[in-house]
Amino acid sequence: MTQQQTNSKPKRPAPLSLRLSDVERQQLAAQAGSLPLGSYIKSVVLADQAHQYRKTRKPPVAEQQLLAEILARLGESRTASNLNQIAKHLNQGTLIVDDELEADLKQAIAEVAWMRTTLMQALKGRP
C-alpha cells in the first residue's frame, strides 16, 4: 500500500485569492461585522446554500482592548501574589492585621472588582 493510499483525507482544492483595494477591504470588513471575511464572502456568494460556514466569530475591537487592559493590569499588579501570601498566613495563624495589610486588602478587593466588571463588559452577549 502506498503512502497516498493510506492517507484517508481528501485533498482540498487550492485557496481562492481575491485582490481588493484598502477601501474595498474596509467596506467588506464593515459589512461582515463579526463574521470572518471568508465566511461572510461564502454566505453572500453561495446564498442559495445559506448555512453557517464557521461559528467562531471575531471579537469586536472594543472587547479586545478591554481584555488587553485586564491582562496588562494583571501583569503589573501583585494582586495574586498578595492574596496568596494573606491566605498562607491565615492558614498558619500568623496573620496580624495592621493598617498596611488593611490597605492592601482594600486595594486587592478593588482590583478584583474592577477585573470582574471589566470582564463582564468584555464578555457580555457571549455564552
Image: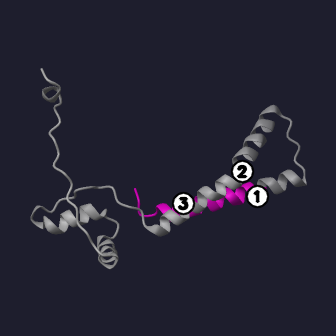
The residues colored magenta run: 106-127
Q: Earlier in the sequence, mark 2 or mark 3?
A: 3
Q: Is residue 108 above or below residue 6?
A: below
What type is the residue that disc 3 sits on?
Leu
Judged left or right of residue 25, residue 110 is right
Does residue 53 appear left or right of residue 77 in this picture? left
Amino acid on which disc 2 is placed: Thr
The circle drawn on residue 67 is 3
Circles 2 and 1: CB atoms closer than 8 Å: yes
Labels 2 and 3 touching (C-beta < 8 A)? no
Give SS at disc 2: helix
**Quarter of the image holding residue 4?**
top left
Name the element at disc 3: helix
Please tell me in which quadrant of the rendered image residue 41 appears.
bottom left
Q: Position of residue 62 (x, y in %)?
A: 49, 69
Crowd band around label 1 with a 10 angstrom C-alpha radius: few (<14), some (14–19), many (20+): few
Q: Per the image, is 71 magenta?
A: no
Label 2 crowd (10 A; few <14 / some 14-19 / many >=20): some
Q: CA distance from mark 3 to mark 1?
A: 20 Å
Give the mark toward the camera: 3 or 1. 3
Q: CA distance from mark 2 to mark 1?
A: 8 Å
Q: Which residue is mark 1?
A: 107
Disc count in the image? 3
Residue under circle 2?
Answer: 79
